[in-house]
Amino acid sequence: MDDIGKRIVSTCDFSGVKPAMMDLPYPPVQVREKNQVYADLISISYCGMVSEMSAIMQYLNNENRMFCERCPMSKTILGMAMAEMMHMQKLGELVALLGGNISFVTRQSGGRQWMWSPQCLTLPEKIGEMLQADLESEQAAINQYNMHIRMIQDKYVTALLERIIQDEQYHIMLLRSMMDMI
C-alpha cells in the first residue's frame, strides 16, 4: 500500500551548514605551565552551569523544535551549536594541557564537585523566548569568560578565551537579528 500522501517529511536541508563564527584565526592552544586552579576554572566553561556544553545542548534542542516552522533560523542556530562544539573542544585541550581531568564534572570553589546535567538548560516553548534564553546564555558566557580572564595570569590561555568571546559576541548579534524577524 502506498503511503506517499500520509508521510510527513522535513523540507529543511541542513547540508552546507557551517559553524557560525568570526572569520578570524584562533591562537594556538597552549599554556605557560600546568596549573590545576586554571584547569578547574576552564572546566567550568567546558561543562559547568554556564558552559559550552550547555550552549550546545540548548541550541540543538531549540533547533530541533523550530526547524519545521523556521528553517533558515534553525540553520543559524545549528551553526552556532557547531561553533560552541569547537569552543568546547579547544577548552578541553586547555584543561588537559593545564593538567586537569576532562570529564563532565567541575570542581567548584571549596573543592565541591558538580556534574553537568540538562538542568543547566532553559527550554521555553515559544521561539521568541528560546532566542531570549539563548541571548541571555551567551551574555552569561561572556561575563564568565571575562571573569576567568581577570583571574588567569597566562597570556596563552587568556588569548584563546578572548578569541572565543568574539564568537559569543557574534552569536549575540545573530540572535538579536533573529529576534527582530519574529
Image (cartoon, grey):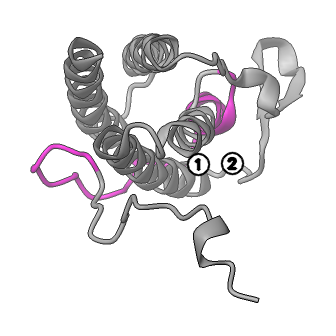
Residue 109 on image: x %, y %: 76, 14
Please name the residue that numbered disc 2 is placed on. Answer: 100
Mark 2 secondary-structure assignment: loop
Tell me which segment is drawn in magenta.
20-49
Q: How many residues crowd around disc 1 within 10 Å: few (fewer than 14), some, or many (20 or more)?
A: many
Question: Is 122 displayed left or right of 77 in the figure?
Answer: right
The mark total stands at: 2
Identity of the amino acid at label 2? Gly
Q: Residue at x 36, y 46 (%)?
A: 71
Q: Residue furthest right?
A: 112
Residue in view at x 51 percent, y 58 percent: 93
Residue at the spot of label 1: 95
Under circle 1, the secondary element is: helix
Where 22 falls versus 82 (above or below)? above
- Which residue shows up at 39% across the image and 26% down it? 153
Does the magenta run of residues contain 113?
no
Quadrant of residue 48 within the rendered picture: top right
Q: Do the numbered discs 1 and 2 sit on residues whose CB atoms are within 8 Å?
A: yes
How far from the left and from the top, in percent, is residue 51? 58, 30
Amino acid marked by disc 1 = Val
Residue appearing at x 41%, y 49% in the figure: 78
Q: Quadrant of the C terminus?
A: top left
Relative to 51, is 132 above or below?
above
Nearest to N terminus: mark 1 or mark 2: 1
170 or 102: nearer the viewer: 170
Instruction: Give the Cα distance between marks 1 and 2.
Output: 5 Å
For the N terminus, the quadrant is bottom right
